[in-house]
Amino acid sequence: MRIAKVLGIAGSPRRNGNTEFLLREFLRGAETSGLETELIILCKLNLSPCTSCDSCQKDGICVIRDDMQMMYKKLTEARFIVFASPIYFCGVSAQLKAFIDRCQSLWSKKYILRQPILGPEKVRRKGFFISTAGTPGNKKVFAGAIATVKAIFHVLEIEYTGELLYPGMEKKDAILTHPTEMQEAYSLGLSLGKDQ
């Protein structure tokens, strides 16, 4: 049986921060369940923002040559995708937003050119969102980021399946003092094994 790929995308500009720790626990749980995982650190990639040139509306291909070219394949082949990002002004990080905006070529391919973005193998794809915010006790701060993640998941034909949202995490290592939250991330990743 083919091992499902779990693609974890860390969107924080800061390495080893709260969302990255949570994402790593999620992936560790997925690996424990027997799934193949891959972690992508966006701030380590060479990614330019979308220039809105509309070239992708002609052939579904982005003309910008950078690390996003390899990411298109990963996005369309993964069975599970999890985005992790801290909240910045009620939205995702600049790094994750730029990454999502560069999926405009996939949107064009699907909705303008009416071409499939996935292979012929029809599988149910699931997506998750992990996020932390400095604002204490108010989960409304996550609403804008959730809307953005749901929008790109819809383009990628991914069902928005779960989320882990933790307010009051202003300091860099704050999540490490919350073992329950770390366990929740691990358990959610572990649950993916049931979808085999």
Image (cartoon, helix red, strand yellow):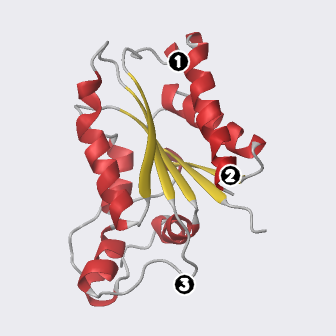
Residue under label 1: 175
Give percent across and percent down for residue 112.
Answer: 24, 83
Give percent across and percent down for residue 5.
Answer: 65, 59
Q: Is residue 157 left or right of residue 2?
A: left
Image point (36%, 87%), residue name:
115
- Mark 2 touches mark 3? (CB < 8 Å): no
- The answer to whether residue 44 is above or below residue 77 is above
Residue under label 3: 120
Question: Which quarter shows the N terminus?
Answer: bottom right
Q: Nearer the viewer, mark 1 or mark 3?
A: 3
Question: Cα distance, mark 2 to mark 3?
Answer: 22 Å
Local crowd at mark 1 within 10 Å, few (<14), some, or many (≥20)? Answer: many
Image point (50%, 55%), residue name:
126
Amino acid type of the residue tagged 3 in the rendering: Pro
Local crowd at mark 3 within 10 Å, few (<14), some, or many (≥20)? Answer: few
Give percent across and percent down for residue 148.
Answer: 28, 49
Dot 1 falls on a residue whose secondary structure is: helix
